[in-house]
Image (spheres, coloured by chain):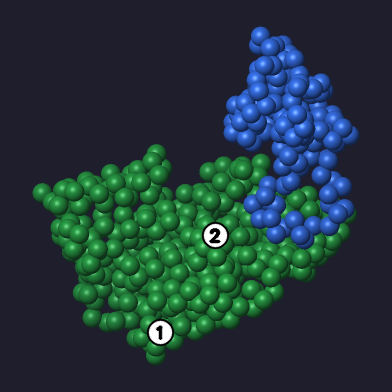
Amino acid sequence: MAEDMPLVDLDTSALEAAMLLAERRLPALVVTETDGSPHSILPASQVVRFLVPGYVQDDPSLARVMNESMADRAGEKLGNKRVRDLLPTERRELAAVNHDDTIIEVAAIMARLRCPLAAVMRDDKLIGVISASRLLELALRPH
Amino acid sequence: MMAIVAVTVFVGAYLLIATEWVSKTITALAGAGVILALGVATSEDAFYSAETGIDWDVIFLLLGMMIIVGVLRRTGVFEFVAIWAAKRAKGSPLRVMILLVLITAVASAMLDNVTTVLLIAPVTLLVCDRLGVSPIPYLIAEVLASNIGGTATLIGDPPNIIIASKSGLSFNDFLINLAPIAALALAVFVAMLPLLFRGSFSVDPERVADIMALEEREAIKDRRLLIICGIVLAAVFAGFIGHAALHIEPSVVALLGAGLLVLLSRSKPRDFMPSVEWETLLFFIGLFIMIGALVKTGVIGALAEAAARATGGDALVATMLILFVSAILSGIIDNIPYVAAMSPIVLQLTEGIADPVQADALWWSLAIGADFGGNLTAIGASANVVILGIAKRSGYPITFWEFTKTGAIVTMVTILLAAPYLWLRYFVIPS
C-alpha cells in the first residue's frame, strides 16, 4: 500500500517545501535526516500555521480585519527559512509503520498521532509513505 | 510556637512565589495546607472568619468580572477600538502609541490589568506588523499604562480589590480619591512617551496604507452581543456606584451581572469558562489562609504595633512610609501577596488615627504605592510578566533590564507625583 512521494530534508528551503505541498496538493511531506532516515512528518497544516501570524492565532477575530492583499505577503514569511524552522520545537513521535502492517494498524497510528501521512519502513529503511486518503481508498474498496 | 510556624510558612511561600521556582498557585495552596494540617488555623478560621479567613468578596468579585470579560471579549470590541484608533492616528507611530496607551489605561480601570494586556497585545502586534515597527516599545508602554490606569477604580487592579474589602472603602471612594492621581500620572506618562522611547517612531510612509486598509468593522462579530454587553456592563457599574443606596456588595453586583450577561447572551459555559482564571482564584484562597494565620497568631498585630511606634503614630509619616516602601517592595515582589499581607497591618494602623480623612490616606498610599510600584520591574505585576511572555512568543523578547530601565523611571515619576498629592489632599487642604 506504500506510495512514492517526494522527500525533503531538514535543510531544504521552506519555500521549496511549501511549493511542493501546494503544487502537488500533498497532505504532508516526510522530512529526512542527512543520512536519509526519516526524521518527522511535516503536515501542510503545519506550514499554514507557520504562515499565520502569532497574534492572529492568539486572537482569531483579527483575521477578519485583514484583507486579501495581506495574504499575498504571507509567503514572504518563508523567506530564508529552512524546513527545520517549520517543525514544532518539541519533536513529535514519528508516524512510522512497517511495510507489512494492516490497514487498521496504520489507521491507529495516524489517529493516535493525528497525522495525515505515515512513513513506511522495511528493515529500518524508508521505502515509501502512505497518506490518509490512500488508506481510505484501500479501506473503502469493495472486496 | 504557632506564630513561628505561621511566619515560617508565609516567608517560605513568599520566597517561592517571588522566585517562581514553583507555580505560585501550588505554593499558596501548599502553604495553606500546612497551616491547616498543623492546626495553626482551623477550618472555621479559614473558611468562615471575616478577620482570618478567605476573603470571599474578593474571590467572587474576581470571578464575576472574569465571566463578564469572558463574554465581552467575544464581541471583538477591543480589536475594533484599537484598530479604529490606529487609523485615526493615520499610521503615525507616536500617535498610535498614545492612543493605544490611553485605550489600555481606560480599559484597565474597568477590567483587571492582565485581561486588558491579553486583549490589547494581539492587536498591537498586528498594527506594528503592518507599520513595520518593533512592537516592543508599544507593549512596554501599554503594560505601564495598564498599571497606572488600573489604579483609578476599585476593580481596576487586584490589590485595590483586596484593599477595598479590608478597609470597607467603596467603589465611589476609590473613584473620588484615586482617579485624579491616576489621570494625572497618565497624562505625565503620555507626555514622557517621546522621550522614553526615543528613536522608535520612524516609519516607512508606504506602510501607512497597510494600516488604513484594515477593516475594523469586521472585528465586531456579534452586534447584538455587543449591545447586551454594553447594557449589562453599564448596569454593573451603576451597581458599584450605587452601593451606598443599594447596599449590595461589589462581589454580588459582579456575580449578578455575570449571571445576567450569560443568560441574555445565551452563552454556553465553554464560551466564557476559559476566561475564568481558576489558578488565580486558588492562589488568592491559599494566600488568604496563610495571612489569616498571621493575623490569628498575633504576628500582624505585633508588626502593626512596631510600625505605629516607628512612625510615632504620625499619619503623614505613616502615609509617606507606606507609599515609598510599597512602591519599592511591590516592584520587586508580586504586589498581590504584598498588599494581602500589608492590609491587616494598615487596618490596625488606621485604628490608631483619630482623623478619618488621614486614616484613609494610609489606604490610598498603599493602593498607589502597590499599583504604581508594579511598574518598577518586569516582575512587579502579573501584567508585566504576561506581556513579556507574549513578546517572547511573538519573536520580540523583552529583557528584564529593557523593561526595568523604563519602568523604574515611570515608577519614580509617578510616585513623586503621588507624594505631594497625598500630602496636599489629606493633610493640607482639609486643615
Q: Position of residue B160 (x, y in %)?
A: 41, 68
Report the number of numbered marks: 2
Q: Residues within 10 Å of mark 2 (few under 14, many from 20)?
A: few
Q: Position of residue B31 (x, y in %)?
A: 27, 48
Q: Amino acid at mark 1?
A: His
Which chain does the blue colour mark? A
Q: Position of residue A41 (x, y in %)?
A: 70, 28
Q: Chain of mark 2?
A: B
- Position of residue B142 relative to residue A93, above or below, is below
Q: Which residue bears the numbered disc 2?
A: B270
Secondary element type, mark 1 = helix
Q: Residue at x 23, y 81 (%)?
A: B354
Chain B, which colour? Answer: green
Q: Which residue bears the numbered disc 1?
A: B243
Q: Residue at x 28, y 44 (%)?
A: B12
The answer to whether residue B328 is visible is: no
- Position of residue B249 relative to residue A12, above or below, is below
Q: Residue at x 72, y 42 (%)?
A: A49
The answer to whether residue B279 is visible is: yes
Q: Position of residue B249 (x, y in %)?
A: 37, 79
Query: Is B158 in front, or is A67?
Result: A67
